[in-house]
Image: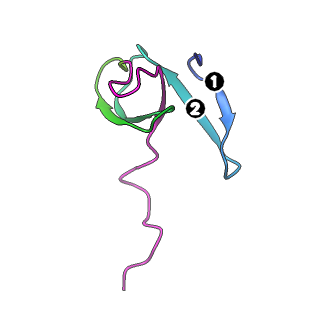
């Protein structure tokens, strides 16, 4: 099991922060083991699909620009 705040190298050279089940958070997260997505406003659950306990926060933000420019 990964601890809260453990950092790991991602494929693109950036760091990914993992959150353990039970951590009080708010937002959209994906299971680090199977990719199942949840939106939470309290503590992270164990993954209902694979029983995983490590979560990664989704990188979506309303303030990010789209990767492709619309014409």
Residues tagged 2 and 1 counted as in contact (Cβ below 8 A): yes
The quarter of the image holding the N terminus is top right
**Mark 2 or mark 1: whose residue is earlier in sequence:** 1
The residue under the point 41% across, 13% down is 22
Q: Which residues are magenta?
A: 46-71
Magenta region includes residue 56: yes
Task: Tell me how far mark 2 sits from mark 1, CA to CA.
Answer: 6 Å
Whether residue 47 appears in magenta in the rendering, the answer is yes
Q: Quadrant of the C terminus?
A: bottom left
Q: Which mark is residue 33?
A: none
Quick one: label 1, few (<14), some, or many (20+) residues within 10 Å?
few
What residue sits 32% from the left and 24% below the top?
A: 48
Q: Going by the image, does 57 lie left or right of 49?
A: right
Q: Is residue 56 above or below residue 52?
A: below
Please tell me whether the stretch drawn in magenta is mainly helix, strand or loop.
loop
Pick the front one: 55 or 5: 55
Q: Quadrant of residue 37?
A: top left
Q: Which residue is mark 1?
A: 6
Q: Position of residue 31 (x, y in %)?
A: 44, 32
Which percent across, then down, holds residue 5?
A: 59, 23
Badge 1 marks a residue whose secondary structure is: loop
**Is 70 placed above or below 44 here?**
below
Q: Which residue sits furthest front?
A: 50
Which residue is disc 2 drawn over? 17
């Amino acid at each position: 099991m990964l601890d809260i705040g453990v950092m790991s190298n991602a494929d693109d050279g950036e760091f990914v922060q993992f959150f353990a089940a039970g951590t009080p958070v708010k937002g959209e997260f994906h299971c680090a083991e199977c990719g199942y997505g949840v939106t939470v406003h309290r503590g992270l659950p164990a993954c209902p699909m694979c029983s995983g306990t490590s979560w990664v926060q989704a990188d979506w933000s309303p303030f990010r620009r789209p990767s492709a420019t619309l014409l």
